[in-house]
Image (cartoon, rainbow, N blue to C red):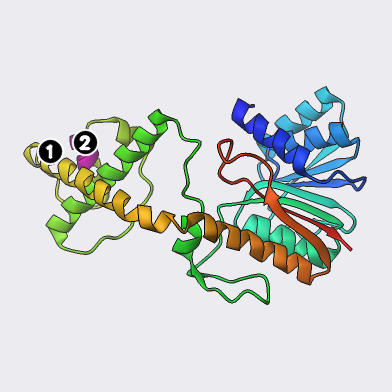
Amino acid sequence: MPGRKREQIEAFAAAAGQSRQPVLDWCGGKGHLGRLLALAWQTPVHTLEIDAALCEVGESLAQRAGVRQEFVVSDALTVANWPRAGQHAVALHACGELHRRLIRDGADKGVSRFDVAPCCYYRGVAESYQAMSANLQLVLTRDDTRLAVTETVTSSPRETRRRDRAIAWKLGFDAYRRTVIGEAYRSFKPVPEVWIRAEFADFLGRMAQREGLPLPSTSVSAAFEAKGWQRRDEVMRLSIVRHAFRRAIEVWLALDLACFLAERGYEVGLGSFCDRRLTPRNLLVSASKV
């Protein structure tokens, strides 16, 4: 397990309220969090994960550690018999609708305690975010919810350079496409990482071919690469203003989860489980049935 991920799991486990109830590790991957809680709390753990291969690895790790941890291979968005009444549900960075479904269904089914660190709030949002709490009326678009998780304090300088290059090159291709067919910006399918590692001329040619555009001549590639970097700089300058609201939006989204649970009769706390330098997604919603 990577060192940073281990630190996140250990910090989450330390911040979560220990209980004697059986634990449900929601969207738990290989079960690293569940295994740690089973060992530290001496309580049985069920880890729910959609990827059977990850579950197989997790079962081996649990046997090696000698802990009571069982894996359930299932889709968290459609599973019918989890979560269950009396459980302590934990979720570390379950994305979007995954953490919302845990909280919604868990409250309906009588989960005793929750410790949830939300992530990627925009996942599962179509056009606008529908607040779970009956008392929160703010309307957020999907782009607003995506803005909440764009902070990259954990990125290395190398990762930042790679990200900037990918943004600039995609914008350079967009400039070429607009020149050829004259339409406004529109999104396109994900770009293979290996294409970003090549020269821009190769990248532009592959993108043009994939999108059904005329292949550009080598002589124009440098000009469109320069346009891409110019537009990247403009985008970053504009994003400074938008990002001033980033944390406030994220706190509001987590508060929505907390208010929903409070309305369902839970005693709720909203705080952080680690420093933002370890992960910017450090908010923790903790709730226990009154």
Task: Write the residue at 76% across / 64% down.
Answer: 105
Look at the image and say whether residue 122 sits in the magenta stretch.
Answer: no
Residue 39 in view of the camera = yes
Q: What is the x, y in percent for residue 21?
A: 91, 48
Q: Secondary structure at mark 2?
A: helix
Q: What is the x, y in percent for residue 254?
A: 64, 59
The residue most toward the left is 219
Residue 136: quarter of image: bottom right
Q: What is the x, y in percent for residue 266?
A: 82, 64
Q: Label 1, label 2: how many angstroms apart (C-alpha)? A: 8 Å
Q: Which mark is residue 258?
A: none
Residue toward you, 67 or 194: 67
Q: What is the x, y in percent for residue 185?
A: 26, 60
Q: Main secondary structure of the magenta part?
A: helix
Stretch of the chain drawn in magenta: 201-205
- Structural crowding at the residue carrying mark 2, measured as other residues with C-alpha within 10 Å and reported as few (<14), some (14–19) or many (≥20): many
Residue 158: quarter of image: top left
Looking at the image, residue 244 sits to the left or right of residue 17; the answer is: left
Residue 150 higher or lower than 219, as above or below: below
Task: Write the residue at 71% across / 30% down.
Answer: 57
**Pointer 1 and pointer 2: residues touching (CB < 8 Å)?**
yes
Task: Write the residue at 25% across / 45% down.
Answer: 207
Residue 122 in view of the camera = no
Residue 137 higher or lower than 160, as above or below: below
Q: Amino acid at mark 1?
A: Ala
Q: Which residue is mark 1?
A: 222
Residue 51: quarter of image: top right
Q: Which residue is mark 2?
A: 200
- Structural crowding at the residue carrying mark 1, measured as other residues with C-alpha within 10 Å and reported as few (<14), some (14–19) or many (≥20): few
Which comes sooner in the sequence, label 1 or label 2? 2
In which quadrant of the rendered image does the N terminus lie? Answer: top right
Q: Secondary structure at mark 1?
A: helix
